[in-house]
Image (cartoon, helix red, strand yellow):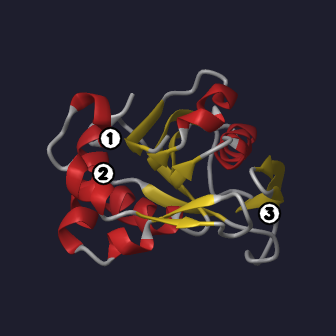
């Protein structure tokens, strides 16, 4: 499901404030840069508000944000819906005991880590990131949360690159996005 198909009038402001940077971080990649969205308070607030409207009242207890851009959207969503925020970080960024999940992404390999005990069995989780491309990062987040005993209710991204078929890797988990880029 996406807000695009629902034709929410706020989508235009969100879409027009995301810049595309060719050949970053390597040749052939069309990088979707949300930092320009963050410079526009109304468009940024609209994005947060759309997520909050979707998840308020859904009994979500955990908002898990994927480093680093999921950290920009996840905390305000968590605060607004009364959930805790759990950062899913790159290796060697969290002190103490961690769980980890390795994954393949569009231009390499990576790993996500989460503190042991940050999520309890039976909690209802929302995974938040800025973008889904091949789905490797979001899938790793789902796997990590489920190994901790959480139920992943849905995944939410500002942007989807549907031609890269990331949605297909989510094993049927619902994915809500605001804008698509083909």
Q: Secondary structure at mark 1?
A: helix
Q: Residues within 10 Å of mark 3 (few under 14, many from 20)?
A: some
Could you say where residue 82 lies in the image, as x and y percent from the top left?
Answer: 33, 54
Examine the image and state in which quarter residue 170 appears. top right
Instruction: Determine the residue positioned at 59% across, 34% down.
Output: 163
* Marks 2 and 1 in Cβ contact (< 8 Å): yes
Q: Secondary structure at mark 3?
A: strand
Instruction: Give the labeled residue for mark 3.
Output: 98
Query: Helix, strand, or loop for circle 2?
Result: helix
In front of the other: label 1 or label 3?
Answer: 1
Q: Is residue 57 above or below residue 64?
A: above
Per the rendering, the mark at residue 81 is: 2
The residues tagged by marks 1 and 3 sit, at their Cα atoms, a distance apart of 28 Å
Query: Quick check: 122 left or right of 104?
Result: left
- Furthest-top residue in view? 172
Q: CA distance from mark 2 to mark 3?
A: 26 Å
**Relative to 62, 116 lies left or right:** right
> Quick check: can you spot residue 48?
no
Q: Is residue 78 visible?
A: yes
Q: Position of residue 119 (x, y in %)?
A: 62, 51
Q: Residues within 10 Å of mark 2 (few under 14, many from 20)?
A: many
- Mark 2 vs 1, N-terminal side: 1
Q: Mark 1 or 3 closer to N-term?
A: 1
Quadrant (top left/top right/bottom left/bottom right) for the N terminus? top left
What's the distance in space between the residues labelled 2 and 1, CA to CA? 7 Å
Q: Residue at x 67, y 24 (%)?
A: 171
The residue pinned by badge 1 equals: 55
The number of numbered badges drawn on the structure is 3
The correct choice, above or below, for 112 with respect to 165 in the image is below
> Is 167 above or below relative to 48?
above
């Amino acid at each position: 499901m996406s807000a695009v198909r629902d034709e929410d009038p706020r989508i235009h402001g969100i879409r027009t404030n995301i810049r595309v940077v060719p050949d970053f971080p390597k040749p052939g990649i069309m990088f979707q840069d949300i930092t320009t969205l963050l410079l526009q308070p109304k468009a940024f607030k609209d994005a947060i508000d759309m997520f909050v409207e979707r998840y308020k009242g859904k009994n979500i207890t955990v908002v898990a944000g994927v480093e680093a851009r999921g950290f920009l959207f996840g905390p305000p969503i968590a605060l607004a819906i009364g959930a805790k925020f759990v950062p899913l970080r790159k290796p060697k960024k969290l002190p103490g005991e961690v769980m980890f999940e390795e994954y393949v992404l569009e231009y390499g390999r990576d790993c996500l880590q989460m503190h042991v005990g940050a999520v309890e069995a039976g909690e209802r989780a929302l995974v938040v990131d800025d973008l889904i491309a091949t789905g490797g990062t979001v899938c790793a987040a789902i796997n990590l949360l489920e190994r901790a005993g959480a139920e992943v209710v849905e995944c939410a991204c500002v942007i989807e690159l549907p031609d890269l078929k990331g949605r297909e890797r989510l094993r049927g988990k619902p994915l809500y996005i605001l804008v698509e880029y083909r």
